[in-house]
């Protein structure tokens, strides 16, 4: 039995492994804040959402497939929550049966397997009934196939029959075994006899009495005989125990997989509701498989920032037919890094089949996503900041694939502008020539200006600054300029300097008037 809520049936894919650079991506794009919002204090949901988001999908069909399942989940939230809680309760109850304690005793394994099967059958029965009620309101291929399979395979007649068999396998009236005498009168050819469902009918009992039979009663103190009988009992039910144990493990695997895939959609619901309570815009993106497609977004914003401030951040818009190289320059603290994080978050969310934090979003499906953000000073560093930047860049280059998206944030800013710009230029040229796509935030305006009119047709964005120095946090299409207005920040940190300059300006103006 397959769940197939994350992947269409027949697709050999998994969410087990996450990228080698997942820690950098999580830190640079502030994903921890998003994961925590999705988890809602459930550590299992946290881990599932983390690995599912970081393990990006590469094909458009699977992304659309997940989007459809997610739409159903959002529109039927109580159904998702009930399925998840049903599975969690069943798992917790099964753990109380000590099923997880391995044993070489087939009778013990049989008893525990029966208990676990009965718990999970009860859970599947409830999920089946929930599915029957919800099916008219579910339209995605994933949910409809899953629920139709559960309704078909776990009908009430089937579950009742299985429960009857399981009850008989507890052998309430003892074990019936057939065997043969082998060499040296040793017993061989054990065969377990299926007990009658109701062997205590009067006619059956009378017939049993009239039939010729032999009875041997084991003496109370016959320890060797008792041991031999125990061995016979174990050998008699060994095959049955193995079959029932395997069945319980198969059902357990199915329930675990169902729990995992439902947990992802539950996490998405939690994030959807959280952003909705803030009033932030949310939409389902349009993934483009065409390598020539550009990047378009309306009112895109940083999800983590919205969750932290519980406010609607300033949104940004762009329609770039060419997105092989996007430069983001402009005023310090003008929203450049925030926009870069927002784009990176949207790319990851799109490529795991989620909604995005924007009124609309469309871009190509990247083969891989890499981040290279500047790092603050760290006493644990075994090398200088510049060497550390080069080391991280080298690790990325070693693992690049054609069509990767690279997000640079003030890379190589730990050295002077001339040297940093030259190193960045050589790296950018090599990446572009090998089919990579780059979004780069930099205060090296000379570096950005050098690409005006470049054959790769870069898109230039610049953080807006009003005449009075106000930052609007809008990042619009505009060519780079020579200054990042760092002096504005200096005056904010040292306001007395601004006051001194104002006094001097007044004094100078007065002197001129006197003259």
Image (cartoon, helix red, strand yellow):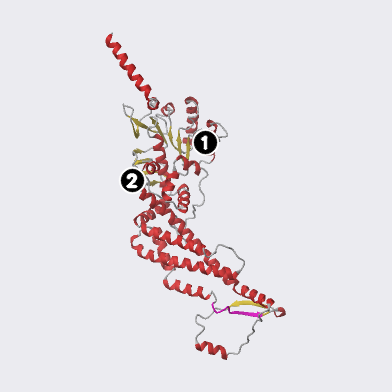
Q: Closest to the observer: 420 or 431?
A: 420
Q: Closest to the observer: 376 or 162?
A: 376
Residue 177 lies in the magenta stretch: yes
Mark 1 surroundings within 10 Å by alpha-carbon count, few (fewer than 14), some (14 through 19), many (20 or more): some
Q: Is residue 176 left or right of residue 225?
A: left
Residue extending farthest right: 184
Q: CA distance from mark 2 to mark 1?
A: 37 Å
Residue extending farthest bottom: 210
Residue extending farthest left: 513
Tag shown at residue 55:
none
Q: Is residue 214 above or below residue 380?
A: below
The residue to which callout 1 is attached is 393
Mark 2 surroundings within 10 Å by alpha-carbon count, few (fewer than 14), some (14 through 19), many (20 or more): some
Residue 369 seen in render: no
Q: State which region is magenta.
A: 172-180
Residue at position x 42%, y 70% in the image: 155
Residue 201: x %, y % from top left: 49, 86
Q: Nearer the viewer, mark 2 or mark 1?
A: 2
Residue 434: x %, y % from top left: 49, 37
Q: Is residue 212 above or below residue 153?
A: below
Q: Is residue 497 above or below residue 241?
A: above
Judged from the image, the secondary structure of the residue bearing numbered disc 1 is helix
The residue to which callout 2 is attached is 278
Residue 476 seen in render: yes
Residue 380: x %, y % from top left: 56, 36
> For residue 125, which quarter of the picture?
bottom left
Residue 58 lies in the magenta stretch: no
């Amino acid at each position: 039995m397959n769940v197939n809520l994350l992947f269409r049936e027949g697709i050999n894919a998994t969410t087990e492994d996450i990228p080698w650079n997942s820690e950098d991506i999580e830190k640079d794009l502030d994903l921890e804040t998003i994961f925590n919002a999705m988890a809602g204090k459930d550590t299992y949901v946290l881990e599932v959402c983390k690995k599912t988001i970081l393990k990006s999908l590469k094909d458009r069909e699977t992304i659309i497939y997940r989007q459809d399942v997610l739409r159903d989940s959002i529109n039927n939230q109580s159904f998702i929550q009930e399925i998840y809680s049903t599975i969690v309760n069943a798992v917790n109850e099964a753990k109380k049966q000590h099923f997880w304690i391995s044993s070489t005793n087939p009778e013990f394994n049989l008893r525990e397997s029966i208990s676990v099967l009965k718990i999970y059958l009860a859970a599947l029965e409830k999920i089946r009934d929930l599915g029957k009620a919800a099916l008219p309101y579910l339209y995605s291929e994933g949910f409809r196939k899953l629920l139709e399979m559960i309704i078909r395979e776990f009908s009430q007649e089937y579950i009742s029959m299985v429960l009857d068999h399981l009850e008989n396998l507890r052998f309430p009236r003892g074990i019936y075994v057939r065997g043969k005498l082998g060499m040296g009168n040793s017993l061989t050819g054990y065969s377990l006899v299926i007990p009658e469902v109701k062997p205590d009918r009067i006619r059956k009992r009378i017939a049993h009495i009239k039939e010729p039979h032999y009875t041997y009663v084991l003496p109370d103190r016959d320890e060797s005989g008792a041991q031999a009988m125990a061995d016979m009992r174990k050998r008699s039910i060994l095959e049955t125990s193995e079959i029932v144990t395997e069945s319980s493990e198969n059902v357990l695997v199915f329930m675990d997989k169902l729990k995992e895939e439902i947990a992802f959609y539950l996490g998405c619901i939690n994030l959807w509701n959280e952003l909705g309570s803030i009033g932030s815009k949310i939409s389902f993106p349009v993934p483009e498989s065409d390598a020539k497609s550009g990047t378009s977004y309306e009112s895109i914003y940083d999800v983590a920032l919205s969750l932290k401030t519980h406010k609607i951040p300033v949104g940004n818009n762009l329609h770039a037919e060419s997105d092989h190289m996007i430069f983001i320059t402009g005023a310090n603290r003008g929203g450049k890094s925030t926009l870069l994080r927002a784009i990176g978050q949207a790319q990851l969310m799109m490529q795991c089949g989620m909604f995005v934090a924007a009124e609309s979003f469309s871009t190509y499906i990247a083969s891989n996503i890499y981040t290279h953000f500047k790092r603050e000073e760290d006493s644990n560093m075994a090398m200088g900041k510049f060497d550390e930047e080069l080391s991280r860049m080298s690790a990325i280059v070693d693992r690049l694939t054609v069509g990767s998206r690279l997000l640079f944030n003030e890379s190589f800013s730990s050295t002077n502008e001339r040297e940093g710009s030259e190193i960045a230029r050589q790296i950018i040229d090599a990446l572009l020539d090998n089919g990579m796509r780059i979004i780069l935030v930099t205060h090296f305006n000379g570096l950005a200006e050098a690409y005006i009119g470049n054959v790769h047709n870069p898109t230039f964005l610049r953080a807006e600054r009003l005449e009075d120095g106000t930052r609007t946090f809008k990042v619009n299409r505009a060519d780079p300029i020579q200054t990042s207005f760092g002096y504005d920040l200096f005056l904010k940190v040292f306001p007395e300097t601004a006051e001194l300059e104002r006094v001097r300006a007044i004094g100078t103006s007065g002197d001129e008037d006197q003259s």
